[in-house]
Each structure stands twice: as C-alpha cells, then as structure tokens.
Amino acid sequence: MWCGVITLFPQMFKVISECGVSSRAIKEGLLGLATWDPRDFTTDNYATVDDRPFGGGPGMVMLATPLRKALESAKRAAPRKPRVIYVSPAGKRFDASMARKFAMNDEPLIFIAGRYEGIDQRVIEHDVDEIISIGDYVLSGGELAVMVIIDALTRWIPGVLGHEQSAPNDAFSEENAGLLDCPHYTRPATLENQSVPSVLLSGDHQAIKRWRKKQSLGQTWLNRPDILEKLTLDETSQALLAEFQQEYES
Ligand code: 9WO
C-alpha cells in the first residue's frame, strides 16, 4: 500500500512514520508513505502558497499552481496510477469499510491536506477523485484527518497486525458485524479489589467467545443503538443481546 500526502506541514507525518503500527508497516515494506510540500514548488522569493479569495472575505485560499506541481511530482512517484483524495467536512464519511476497501484494493492514494480557508476550487474540480470526511467538524488543517485515514487503513493491510484476525476483530469490522468491540482486560487479575470477569480466566474458549460476542452486542445496544438498528441479528445474537439486556436491567 502506498500513500502520498500534499501538505504544508510534512513534519506532522512523523507521528505515523515514526510511531506505532504504521511505523512498523513502513519498516516492513507493507506501507509506503511520502510527503510533498507545495512550498517547494513555488517560484517567488517568498514561497507563496496562498492568496486572498476572489470576492473578498476573511482568510486566504491555497493557490492551485503549487498544489498542482506538488501533485504532479507525487503522481510520478506513485507505483501506479493513484487516486487523489481531498479531506474536508464536505466529503463522504470515512468508516471501517472504506478503510478496508482502500487496503484491499492496494490502489496508491494521494491525499491533499488543505489549510487556511481551503484550496482553490479548480483543484477540487479537476484534480481530485474523491472527497472524504472523518466527521462533522472543522480542523485547523486536513493533516490530522489524513493521518486518521492512513492509520485506520494500515490496520487492514495484510500482515501489518501481528494476529491476522486483529483488524477483523476491530470494532465496526464486518467480521464483528459492525458491532462495537468487547471490553478488554489484562494482568493483574485483581486490581485494587476490581476483578476480571471470571469467564476470561476460565480457559473455556467457547464460553469466552460467547461472552465477548454478548458484550459486543450489549455495548452496541448501550452506546450506539443507531448501529444496532441497521443490523439484522441472527437468532443466536438476538438471544445473547436479550440475555445482556435482562442482566443489565435486573
Ligand atoms: C472546511 C469546511 C467547513 C464546512 C464545510 C466544508 C468545508 N471544507 C473545508 C475545508 O476544506 N477546509 C480546509 C481543510 C481548510 C481548513 C482546514 N481544512 C480542514 C479539513 N479542516 N477540517 C477538515 C476536515 C477534513 C476531514 N474531515 C473533517 C474535517
């Protein structure tokens, strides 16, 4: 999987290139990550990347030409024809299925992270293939949204996570039928008289699997009923949820 990012703050991407799962994926050659700074593609003495908006109004707009030159350079570096993605609150909402699709398709991606009030609309209309949002709020720049997307899709790249099943067991994964994750515990078994559910210490893998599914159903019912409403539960899951609800309400 290869990702390029057009950004005025390439140093921000050290967070994913030097830390955590994405850093290991890069080291293992499972993820390629490179950044292009539009400032490096300016020709004036001030390295100008923005200008006042036509029609007036507050703030500045990112100039198209440095963006396009940076984008052309990134496209030349991509292993194959890339998909160009602009991140904005106006985009299609990013979710686990999109993350999985990007990772499984292995299509090179080039992200454009905007700053100021945004980028010249002609770049969006003529150079961008897809607009993606990570939520209904405005950040100070697109970089954090790009990092969220890259981190989430990296977990789906085959071989990245130690236990091949980890990503499918993530919350919102299809294998978990889009349910929230179950609670997790680790040593010590007793912590300031707070214990671990005994089933997790039993060694009974069937009972543990049943408990985890029941907890995922219950946590989704409690915290994200909107997700549960969209799901069609089989009889086993319906019975497990009823059992959780009965215990919760007793
Ligand atoms: C801001 C905005 C606000 C409401 C509706 C649409 C919008 N688009 C943008 C926009 O493109 N802003 C630029 C990129 C400039 C300001 C920083 N940018 C940004 C992207 N802030 N927040 C995002 C973002 C990206 C993805 N998901 C959520 C927020």
Image (cartoon, rainbow, N blue to C red):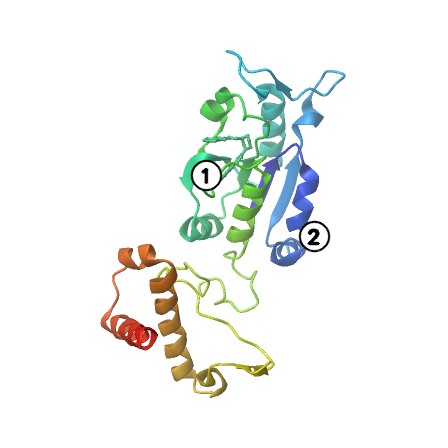
In percent of width and height, residue 67 lies at 60, 25
- Residue picked out by circle 2: 18
Q: Residue furthest front?
A: 250
Residue shown at the point (60%, 51%) measured from the top left: 31
Nearer the observer, 9 or 116: 116
Q: Is residue 247 visible?
A: yes
| In the rendered image, the vertical position of residue 15 relative to residue 90, given as above or below | below
Dot 2: within a 10 Å radius of its alpha carbon, few (fewer than 14), some, or many (20 or more) residues?
A: few
Q: Residue furthest top?
A: 55
Residue shown at the point (56%, 19%) measured from the top left: 58
Asked if residue 29 lies left or right of residue 231, the reply is right
In percent of width and height, residue 83 lies at 49, 37
Amino acid at dot 2: Glu
Dot 1: within a 10 Å radius of its alpha carbon, few (fewer than 14), some, or many (20 or more) residues?
A: many
| In the rendered image, the vertical position of residue 195 relative to residue 97, given as above or below | below
Nearer the observer, 3 or 97: 97
Instruction: Tell me if the residue at label 1 has its CB under 8 Å from ligand 1.
Output: yes
In percent of width and height, residue 244 lies at 32, 74
- Residue picked out by circle 1: 132
Quarter of the image with the C terminus in it: bottom left
Nearer the observer, 215 or 36: 215
Residue shown at the point (46%, 85%) measured from the top left: 198
Amino acid at dot 1: Ile
Q: Residue furthest left?
A: 235
Mark before the other along the chain sequence, 2 or 1: 2
In percent of width and height, residue 61 lies at 57, 21
Instruction: Tell me if the residue at label 2 has its CB under 8 Å from ligand 1.
Output: no
